[in-house]
Amino acid sequence: MPDYAELEQASLDQLATNDQDWLAYLTLGEALMRREEFKGAARAFASAAEIQPSSARAWGSMGKVLCYLGNFDGAQEYVDKGSALDSSEPSVLIGLGLIAYKAANLKGARRFFERASIANPLDVDAWFHLGQIYWEIGDMRRCADAFARSLQLDPGNMVALRTMGNAYVAQKKFEEALAAYQQAAVIDPEIETTFYGIGTLLVKLGRDDEALEAFEKALKIDPNYGEAWEAIAEVRNRKV
């Protein structure tokens, strides 16, 4: 996984040398977007589009980040400009998919995200949003597969990890679900619901002692977590 802080700094260093380097602005925007600094990313993509107005990627990236900022009306203008230049550009397709998703057009969104994943199999956003769509339509196998592809490119995405884990639970693939939740706990060990999820999966796998440890970790984070107290009581009652 790229070090996005390093990418940001490298882009800034390049722009300090040449403030007309539109590719450096694109890289800067991508780095900021990955760190969820969406306003800064929007400024970087806008600069790239201004310097190189023939770049479909610049326009599409601007539209995509505006979607993440909740400005879907503004995003439409940018993705339309990008589409006019190159309708197969992944950032354009993802922007169109996000707009369709906002409009509750799941079939349309799915088509755009699938096209983006085919156009660039290394586009993490295409796989992530495909996972979301498959979750919405109840296709848990494809949901888990899409999030797995997304996590190969961005292993630290907590939403992808937990949703993939839930998709595995829906398929009764408890070992795979447990692995996803355990990875989420490594990335952020301060979320009590993650440890509660680990505990419930360990119970399903018949590993009660480990489940108790997980529930106790959840309670260390939130001593008032009622479901964890109830789960501990149920496990201990079974062991009597």
Image (spheres, rainbow, N blue to C red):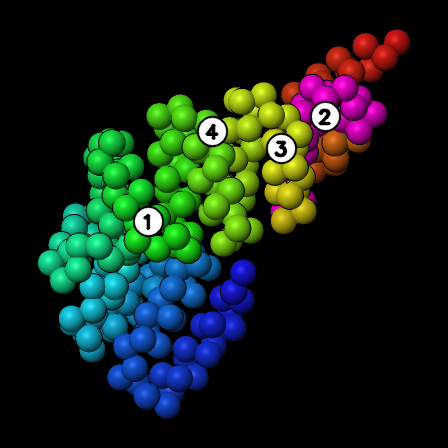
Work out whether mark 2 precedes mark 3 in sequence or the reverse, and give the earlier one: 3
Q: Which residue is mark 4?
A: 141
Of residues 152 and 62, the one drawn nearer to the viewer in this rendering: 152
Q: Amino acid at mark 1?
A: Ile
Q: Which residue is mark 1?
A: 118
Q: Identify the secondary structure beneath mark 4.
A: helix
Is residue 29 visible in the rendered image? The answer is yes
Q: CA distance from mark 2 to mark 1?
A: 37 Å
Q: In the picture, residue 137 is in which quadrant?
A: top left
Above or below for 198 versus 65: above
Work out whether mark 2 precedes mark 1 in sequence or the reverse, and give the earlier one: 1
Work out whether mark 4 precedes mark 1 in sequence or the reverse, and give the earlier one: 1
> Relative to 105, is 206 on the left or the right?
right
Q: Nearer the viewer, mark 2 or mark 3?
A: 3
For the magenta stretch, what is the residue range? 188-212
Q: CA distance from mark 4 to mark 3?
A: 12 Å
Q: Nearer the viewer, mark 2 or mark 4?
A: 4
Is residue 228 visible in the rendered image? The answer is no
Would you call the spot at circle 3 few (<14 residues within 10 Å), some (14-19), or many (20 or more)? some
Of residues 87 and 213, the one drawn nearer to the viewer in this rendering: 87
